[in-house]
Amino acid sequence: MTLRLDFANEQDEVELPQGLENKLEELLAIAGELEGVETGDVSVTIVDDESIRELNAQYRGLDKSTDVLSFSMLETAGDEAPIHYGDEADETDADEGEEGELVELPDEPIGDIVISAATAKRQAEEYGHSLERELGFLFVHGFLHLIGYDHQDEAAEAVMTEKQERVLGKAGLSR
């Protein structure tokens, strides 16, 4: 088995960059190689603000839009899979098992990433870079959450930022 990407665009509000699916596959391969993740499935779904708001309300209890949500198939002993997100850190987001260890379920996908195209477009304009770069950033950010990284404090955020920029740079999406 290899590391595979399942891509779906479920919005029609924002025109996505040509070749986005191929770029996300490239980012997945680079990130997987750098992180030693060789197998599994990552699903990415591009949605509108309303859809991601509904997911955010359902799974996080926050009735507002966000840029990215990650639904990891890593589980902790006896608990549901942790849900991560890109707009803010929250220590209550991490589920802990009996010993607080994450356990990967065999033969299961790595997880699902949901990205709001409209929010990504606004953020790309705000940061002065391309929509492709912003979508790539959110995808890599989501992938890192899927494999257990978080940004609950400055040190953890610095680690994630360095990893994200390294992957994006290798794919030609640096700032």
Image (cartoon, grey):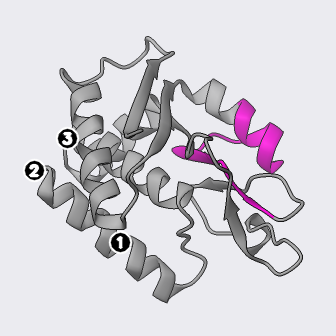
Q: CA distance from mark 1 to mark 2?
A: 16 Å
Is residue 77 inside the magenta stretch?
no
**Is residue 124 found left or right of 52 in the rendered image?**
left
Dot in front, 2 or 3: 2
Q: To which residue does mark 2 refer?
A: 172
Magenta segment, which residues?
Answer: 54-76
Q: Are marks 1 and 3 in contact (CB under 8 Å)?
A: no
**Amino acid identity at mark 1:** Thr
Q: Secondary structure at mark 3?
A: loop
Q: Residue at x 25, y 65 (%)?
A: 165
Q: How many discs mark residues in the rendered view?
A: 3
Above or below for 2 versus 142: above
Give whichever of 154, 121 is nearer the camera: 154
Nearer-N-terminus badge (1/3): 3
Dot in front, 1 or 3: 1
Q: Residue at x 42, y 24 (%)?
A: 7
Q: In the orientation shown, which residue stands out farthest toward the left?
A: 172
Q: To which residue does mark 1 refer?
A: 161
